[in-house]
Amino acid sequence: MNYFLDNKDLEFTLRNLDLADIARMRENNYENASKFDTAPADFDDALDNYARALKVVGEIAGDRIAPRSREVDLHGARFADGKVTYDPLTVKNLDELSKAGLMGVMLGHEYGGLNFPVSVYTMMTEIVSRADASLQNIFGLQDIAETINFFGNDEQKAQYLPGFARGEYDGAMDLTEPEYGSDLQSVRLRAYQDEKGQWYLNGMKRFITNGCAKVHLVLARSEEGTTDGRGLSMFICEACPQLVVRRIEDKMGIHGVATCELQFNDVPAQLCGKRRLGLIRYVMSLMNGARVAISAQAVGIAEAAYREARKYAAEREQFKKSIDKFPAIFSMLSSMKVKLTAMRAMLYETTRVVDLRNSYTELVEKGNPTAEDRNLQKYYTKLAAQMTPMCKALCTEGANSIAYDTIQIHGGTGYMRDFNAERYYRDARITNIYEGTTQLQVVAAIGGIMQRDADQRMAELFALELPANLAAIREKLAVMHTKQLEAVKFVSEKRTADGSKDVAYHDLVARSLVEMETMILVGLLLLRDGAICAERAPIAERFVLDAVSEFERRYLVVTSGDDLLIANHRDIIDY
């Protein structure tokens, strides 16, 4: 089974996602074709390259990775005598992806990469995640190479990027420490220089995905006497005797990849980029990439879980008919499908924006930009900053919901290890925790919502020509958008008794505002797609109709201004 060709929603997305400008800019107006055999001559050629690569990933994922996934989950990564060992099937999976030329997807042709946009790479990670979510945690760490490509010097690029493209190097992102979790500005791992200027790293890191990797990007405190994010820099180091894996975590899910605790004992390192920008710029770039990657992982898990539920419901008979004929079950399956399609629409709208941000940023920093180029770079940077956390929140919470319902449809059998349903449930649970919990995604997104950074894109979507049935549904979204503006204005103007901004109220209702914004944007995206393909119209209608009542409930709470909201929560906790 080919996990790309059997997914008409993913094929639809590739055909209809507007990648023309992105491909043109990535390929230097297609001048790359005269220098590299792998470079496309025009957009049709580029699109054909994308489709062929996705077919290869789909075949490997469906025919080879997926059948091995249960055994990988059973045995997992192992740790003994200070060494991490991956299951032989995981090693085989990575080897097959490497031999297919899929380990340098976004790297430039000059480094042996495919030079694909984030959107296409994200489709690959979704496909791999559907087959084995834990494998994505290794395959998806190609962001490490991308970070070196964006911020490293020419020597570092030449040293590492060809090895990543050939699959000789794998990567790890070493950020979290035992005492600080998501509070990255408090990182304490020390970076210091000797008299010759050589950097060394000392300290601990914890919860490091693929911490046994050959190449590490490490957030460390380079400035003595500092305690905040302005004293942090990013470093590159390699696996060596001084970099010790102390243990690996015994996890609930994603067993196929090791999550490590690391000890740095004077590990030689190279500064990546400029000092003091480690958290402020480089980790923020890494985290934005990670949000997209985990969103794709969540969509892949949700796709696998939904298909498992649908298959089981069609085969399981009760009272002389299959259970998918019962309204209680087919309504669940319908809701799961709507949610999954909404997640994918949001994911690839987000990756398109990220691709445009990346392209215009490179043009501004390395090209000969016009004033319009600079304005577009600023616009897409702000839009990406709002949409990536919104996307992660929607996709990861949705994956958990779909995996939950998959077990429910299976009944008691879904609780048993004989079926894949329980593995999807375990694997999905981490997605709304790592790379920033849903609560932190709200913190990341709310600023853009209060500043209305997505209104221009919403206006473009509202202006699209729609058939009459979908135009009527759009009117409901227009009402919701008006109310969203009212809610944002209400919260921004709310004051405490002493006249200061009511920060506590703002923070309390932030999640509702983020989810309300997401409902509107996703509804518009689904209507856009329903206008292109009539088969998708019922999904758009169902999503919006379901969203109306939930939006209204949240709107009433947000605009109530009831100070008892905060006091009541505290009273409940204290009881």
Image (spheres, grey):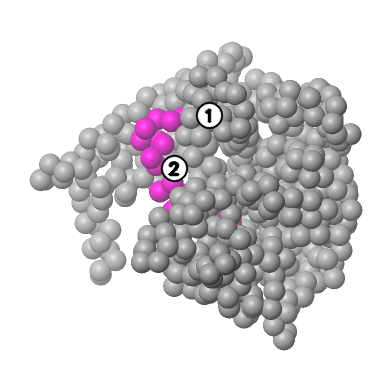
Residue 559, x across and y down, in percent: 27, 37
Q: Residue 213 is drawn in which quadrant?
A: bottom right
User: Secondary structure under badge 1?
Assistant: helix
Graded by Cα atoms within 10 Å as few (under 14), some (14 to 19) or many (20 or more), the crowding at tag 1 reads many
Which residue position is annotated with label 1? Answer: 377
Q: Which residue lies at the image location 61% right of the left edge and 65% below the top edge?
A: 269
The spot of residue 469 in percent (x, y) is: 58, 17
Give the mark, 1 or 2, whose residue is nearer the N terminus: 1
Q: Is residue 146 left or right of residue 200?
A: right
From the viewer's side, name the closer residue of 538 and 126: 126
Q: Residue at x 25, y 40 (%)?
A: 560
Q: Which residues are magenta?
A: 430-454
Residue drawn at x 78%, y 45% as measured from the top left: 111
> Is residue 278 highlighted in magenta?
no
Disc 2 marks a residue whose amino acid type is Ala
In the rendered structure, which amino acid carries the disc numbered 1?
Answer: Gln
